[in-house]
């Protein structure tokens, strides 16, 4: 087994009882990783169905993969990708966010590319803020994050006006006119009406005003998510000043674009935050004055004049055995301290004793890395069936980049991997 090299790996999925690992490459392939390396042929190739740049990696592409909880027997899996605009896409919109179901071969080593069944197609006005990760929860439903539609500050083409008039736009604060800036919760094992999915009866807006598919909202660009027990961790990439990780619950509003993290946001001048802003949504249906939910982790882009990071990369709560001192910690990262050079970072955060306090975060040092740094862009994390964690990286921003997957193991003390 010596398949094609990875370019921009953004997903790593496993399933109970299946000896393979599936790696998502943003350029449009899913690869099978076995005991002897990457298979010669890709598991899935959807490059002919994508809309993305051919010279530089932006935020479009093949962005997420979720194996059905019964994947070993029903062979069904789901992907998120950026497709060209369709007939129903509004004029001047950039692309369509597609959620599709495919079926794998009996040996689970390849997918039937002709088995695609589109579950959902969402018009995307801009090229960025696409989110893309998808995951099945312990309840058996599929959770599907969507960014706010892109551009900047949740404003401009394709961004509706919301209840907060001081900031133009706000798909993140709108729950009636589109699905953007939210996390959806879908039943992909059933269908209702003319839809290719059903909506769980206990979704928070079912029976009231707002889109039934929504599980939570007020998000900018929820890049990676993971479950630990019944808890849903979502990393939401910020605009200009702060990055955040949220513990997402049904019906909660995470504040974007009224706030960036815990701080007031100014859409007209993102570098100059407003001195004050609401702590809750306006008191009219379907908001009813709901309080914004604070992130459990927040950090600035700069601190003391030094770069901290640019884009949070969601990870996992650690429940493996290799990193003994990190059991129960949330391990995550940041894409890079610099846009032009690969200076990604790896962090871990401890759960506080008081539920409404922020989790404290510290940085891992990388053994053998220059100044303890990783020396790569961090794109995503993956979890093996035994609970060990993997970090997905690339050395460049190119479509011909050099991607790699590393397993986190301890070379010595508890802060080094």
Image (tube, helix red, strand yellow):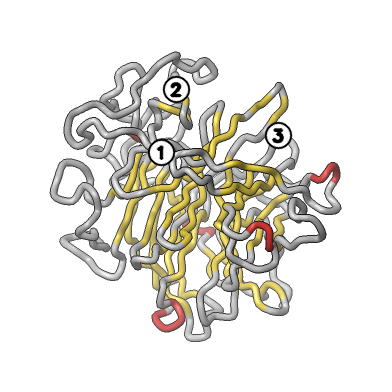
Nearest to N terminus: mark 2 or mark 1: 1
Nearest to N terminus: mark 3 or mark 2: 2
Q: Residue at x 44, y 44 (%)?
A: 355
Does residue 56 appear in the picture of this structure?
A: no
Q: Are marks 2 and 1 in contact (CB under 8 Å)?
A: no
Label 2: element kind: loop
> Which labelled disc corresponds to residue 182?
none
> Which labelled disc corresponds to residue 338?
3
Q: Position of residue 248 (x, y in %)?
A: 40, 48
Q: State the image quarter where residue 58 is shown.
A: top right
Q: Position of residue 103 (x, y in %)?
A: 42, 75
Nearest to N terminus: mark 3 or mark 1: 1
Q: Residue at x 81, y 60 (%)?
A: 411
Label 1: element kind: loop
Residue wearing tag 2:
265
Q: CA distance from mark 2 to mark 1?
A: 13 Å
Give 315 or 53, whichever is nearer the viewer.
315
Q: Where, quadrant-wise, is the N terminus in this rendering?
A: bottom right
Q: CA distance from mark 3 to mark 2?
A: 23 Å
Q: Residue at x 70, y 51 (%)?
A: 394
Number of the front mark, 3 or 1: 1
Residue wearing tag 1:
219
Q: Position of residue 144 (x, y in %)?
A: 39, 54
Residue 248 vs 301, above or below: the answer is below
Residue reaching furthest to the bottom: 106
Give 251 or 398, whichever is nearer the viewer.
251
């Amino acid at each position: 087994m010596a398949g094609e090299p990875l370019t921009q790996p953004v997903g790593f999925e496993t399933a109970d009882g299946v000896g393979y690992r599936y790696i998502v490459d943003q350029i449009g392939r899913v690869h099978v990783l076995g005991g002897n390396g990457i298979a010669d042929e890709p598991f899935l190739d959807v490059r002919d169905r994508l809309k993305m740049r051919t010279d530089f990696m932006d935020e479009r592409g093949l962005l997420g993969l979720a194996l059905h909880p019964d994947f070993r027997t029903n062979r069904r899996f789901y992907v998120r990708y950026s497709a060209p605009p369709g007939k129903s896409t509004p004029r001047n919109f950039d692309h369509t966010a597609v959620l599709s179901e495919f079926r794998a071969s009996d040996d689970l080593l390849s997918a039937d590319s002709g088995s695609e069944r589109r579950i959902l197609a969402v018009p995307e006005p801009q090229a960025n803020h696409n989110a893309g990760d998808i995951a099945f929860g312990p309840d058996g439903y599929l959770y599907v994050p969507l960014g706010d539609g892109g551009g900047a500050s949740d404003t401009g083409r394709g961004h509706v006006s919301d209840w907060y008039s001081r900031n133009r736009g706000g798909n993140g604060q709108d729950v009636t006119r589109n699905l953007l800036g939210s996390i959806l919760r879908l039943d992909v094992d059933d269908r209702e009406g003319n839809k290719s999915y059903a909506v769980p009866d206990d979704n928070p807006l079912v029976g009231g005003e707002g889109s039934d598919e929504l599980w939570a909202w007020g998000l900018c660009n929820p890049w990676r998510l993971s479950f630990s027990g019944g808890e849903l961790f979502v990393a939401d990439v910020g605009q200009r000043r702060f990055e955040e990780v949220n513990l997402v619950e049904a019906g909660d509003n995470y504040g974007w674009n009224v706030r960036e993290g815990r701080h007031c946001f100014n859409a007209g001048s993102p570098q100059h935050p407003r001195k004050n802003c609401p702590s809750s949504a306006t008191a009219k249906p379907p908001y009813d004055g709901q309080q914004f939910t604070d992130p459990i982790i927040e950090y600035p882009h700069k601190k003391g004049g030094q770069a901290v990071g640019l884009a949070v990369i969601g990870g996992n709560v650690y429940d493996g055995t290799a990193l003994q001192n990190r059991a129960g910690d949330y391990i995550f990262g940041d894409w890079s301290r610099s846009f032009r050079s690969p200076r990604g970072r790896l962090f871990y955060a401890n759960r506080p004793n008081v539920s409404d306090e922020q989790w404290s975060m510290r940085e891992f040092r990388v053994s053998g890395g220059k100044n303890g740094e990783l020396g790569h862009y961090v794109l995503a994390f993956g979890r093996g069936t035994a609970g060990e964690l993997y970090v997905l990286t690339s050395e460049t921003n190119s479509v011909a980049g050099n991607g790699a997957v590393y397993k986190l193991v301890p070379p010595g003390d508890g802060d080094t991997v």
